[in-house]
């Protein structure tokens, strides 16, 4: 069986992210107004904070996974000068799961670490499957979506439809996430990308 140390590392990063997320609030915080609440109550905000603190390390492992899946190196990541990124596959300030450029380059956003990434746009079944999945499987499902979006004329609808059968050798669990997304997708919600809009 093939060894995948980079993927295991990614899973550990996700466990750390979610371990922090599920920390119980202190008794003194119960009943506090939203403005006074800790970021740990906001999955998207927490995911972004986690991603920003570990951006370099996560980027290295996201890029490794993309290479493992056979994605052409010229299609891995891009730069974002305004965000201070010269070139990266992981963009922590992007709240979505990922994004793809018209010429097929793919990035991953901090949404990969958010337990609630899929709920609003894809329903509870997809959301629960995603929440209970390892980070590598979450990552694979995001990469498949963005890859298929480019392969089908930058159509989000076509990406939702084709991701479950992507030619990329993603995990079975990632295909299950993609299938649940297809089943639960709420077309009436205009998605900018994979998941919730950036905050
Ligand atoms: Zn899309």
Image (tube, helix red, strand yellow):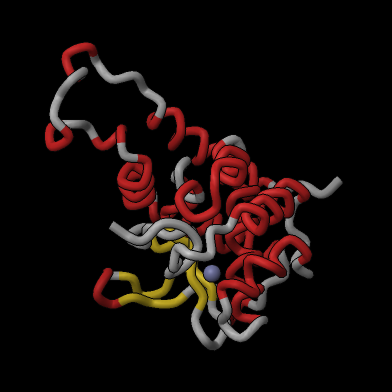
- List x then y, in percent, for residue 114: 44, 45
Quadrant (top left, top right, bottom left, bottom right) of the C terminus: bottom left
**Looking at this rendering, what residue extends furthest in the front direction?**
188
- Drawn side of residue 60 relative to residue 166, left or right: left
**Picture residue at 22% right of the left edge, 32% below the top:** 38
Regarding residue 134, the answer to whether it shows in the image is no
- List x then y, in percent, for residue 58: 47, 53
Regarding residue 47, the answer to whether it shows in the image is yes
Quadrant (top left, top right, bottom left, bottom right) of the N terminus: top right
Vertical arrangement, residue 65 with respect to residue 132, above or below: below
**Picture residue at 51% right of the left edge, 75% below the top:** 100
- List x then y, in percent, for residue 176: 72, 49
Vertical arrangement, residue 18 with respect to residue 178, above or below: above
- List x then y, in percent, for residue 140: 64, 56
**Picture residue at 62% right of the left edge, 55% below the top:** 181
Vertical arrangement, residue 179 with respect to residue 161, above or below: above
Q: Quadrant of ligand 1?
A: bottom right
- Drawn side of residue 56 relative to residue 175, left or right: left
- Report the label total: 0
- Drawn side of residue 188 relative to residue 199, left or right: right
Name the residue nearer the viewer: 150 or 49. 150
């Amino acid at each position: 069986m093939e060894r995948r140390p980079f993927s295991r590392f990614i899973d550990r990063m996700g466990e750390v992210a979610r371990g922090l997320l599920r920390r119980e609030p202190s008794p003194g915080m119960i009943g506090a107004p939203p403005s006074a609440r800790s970021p740990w109550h906001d999955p998207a905000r927490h995911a972004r904070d986690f991603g920003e603190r570990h951006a370099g390390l996560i980027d290295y492992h996201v890029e490794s996974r993309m290479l493992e899946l056979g994605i052409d190196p010229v299609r891995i990541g891009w730069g974002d000068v305004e965000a201070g990124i010269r070139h990266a596959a992981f963009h922590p300030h992007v709240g979505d799961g990922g994004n793809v450029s018209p010429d097929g380059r793919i990035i991953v956003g901090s949404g990969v670490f958010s337990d609630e990434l899929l709920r609003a746009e894809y329903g509870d079944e997809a959301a629960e499957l995603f929440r209970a999945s390892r980070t590598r499987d979450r990552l694979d499902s995001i990469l498949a979506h963005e890859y298929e979006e480019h392969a089908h004329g930058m159509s989000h609808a076509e990406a939702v439809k084709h991701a479950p059968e992507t030619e990329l050798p993603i995990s079975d669990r990632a295909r299950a996430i993609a299938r649940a997304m297809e089943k639960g997708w709420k077309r009436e919600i205009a998605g900018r990308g994979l998941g919730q809009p950036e905050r």
